[in-house]
Image (spheres, rainbow, N blue to C red):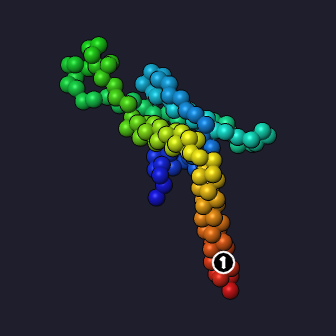
Amino acid sequence: MSKYPTLTKMGITSVENIDKYTVQHQGEVDVLKIYYKRPKGSLLSRSKKFSFMRGRNFLPIEARNSKAFDQMESINPELMHAIDELKQLNAMREKDSNMDPKQRMIKDLDHLEKVMTSKIDDLRRQIEEMK
């Protein structure tokens, strides 16, 4: 299971490349824009935009024409979860940037070792399936 299920559900697969994000309110829609770090010359997009409709709390029909009703809009729960995960990602980055360089390199090596082991096991499984 992913550490960031909402972001994964939104189709974001490279959370490690997220640089920053913004949220804008445009009428009844909230727009989350996620910016990525990309190398120069990369053909991948530098940002993705997601729109979320604002919900309205249940009120009697008589109250719907009042000014108070316009202020009763609520933020989409999926957007709230995505923002929480983005904040969590930023907090992890700050924690990692404060880490001792030697510790960070050991952590990176451990991660690389896990990825390589997983990939080698997957390739061996594919070879076995060919027989």
Q: Is residue 4 visible?
A: yes
Q: How many marks?
A: 1
Give, as a three-letter code, the residue at label 1.
Answer: Arg
Crowding near the residue tagged with mark 1, few <14, some 14–19, many ≥20 C-alpha atoms within 10 Å: few
Q: Is residue 126 visible?
A: no
Indicate the position of residue 70 as horizontal and vertical percent values: 32, 18
Q: Which residue is mark 1?
A: 124
Indicate the position of residue 68 as horizontal and vertical percent values: 27, 16
Residue sitting at 47 percent across and 23 percent down? 25
Q: Nearer the viewer, residue 118 or 56?
A: 118
Residue 19 higher or lower than 62, as above or below: below
* Disc 1, SS: helix
Q: Quadrant of residue 67?
A: top left
Residue 110 higher or lower than 35, as above or below: below
Left or right of residue 105, residue 6 in this image: left
Q: Nearer the viewer, residue 61 or 47?
A: 47
